[in-house]
Image (tube, grey):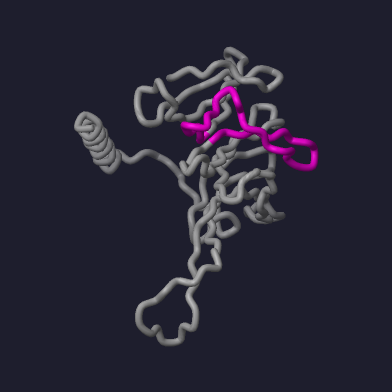
Amino acid sequence: EEAYYKNKAAKEIVACDIASELVENPMDVDLNNLGEGINEAYSDNGAALQGEQFYFQSTRPVSTGKKIKVKGKVKGNTATYDSTFNIRMYKASKDEIGQWGNKEQVSLEIKAKEYNIGNPTISYDGSRMYFSVCKTINEKAICNVYVSQYEGSGWGKPAPLKEINSKVSSTKMPYAFYDEVAQKEYLLYVSNQKGGLGKFDIYYSEISKNGSLSEPKNL
């Protein structure tokens, strides 16, 4: 445990050095907020493009309907309710003046009462979408990578990737990458599966033409 924190502290020092260097020699980068058509009061991130469709994950508050016991009297309050936060996937497109909007939740059938879904990534040919689904398995929070096939008018029923998922460890944050030189497609992801070098390691698998994955390899 001591070695872990020493290594973590060393990385933070390097990050501070890089930050100081960037302040003195800033990079020429133009950052633009995508506007209220995408962003709201809570976190909006993990984006992917499929043609003119923009996919992303969004954190939203959801009321549990449970009353919170408040000590003492709170003037003007007759009832206070608890709330939780869920992460869901949304899509948006540009309007006639080029602004992002027309936002709506992506309907994906997940067999779980409580879950979070996000980190979408689209395959090179646009036919498959990979994403993370996190839910509780045996009283433990586990994330798995799922895939959904595009069926012309929307995304089909999601299926877990059995080649890389586990019921005792997490696999998440997929990224589909096409190597134009080798003409091969790969799926990168992180996992804390047994045999890794750290808490979460980066792995990759080659995606075959029929969508199956090769044996995971640690980077």
Q: Position of residue 77 (x, y in %)?
A: 46, 83
Is 53 placed above or below 185 here? below
Q: Position of residue 9 (x, y in %)?
A: 22, 36
Report the side of 192 relative to 101 (left or right): left
Q: Is residue 192 visible?
A: yes
Q: Residue at x 47, y 23 (%)?
A: 203
Q: Residue furthest right?
A: 152
Is 113 placed above or below 193 here? below
Q: Is residue 21 visible?
A: no
User: What's drawn in magenta, residue-wise?
Assistant: 144-173
Q: Which corner quadrant of the image does residue 127 belong to?
A: top right
Q: Residue at x 46, y 47 (%)?
A: 31
Q: Position of residue 44 (x, y in %)?
A: 52, 51
Is 45 placed above or below 146 here? below
Q: Residue at x 57, y 50 (%)?
A: 114
Along the viewing direction, whichever of 90 and 218 lies nearer the viewer: 218
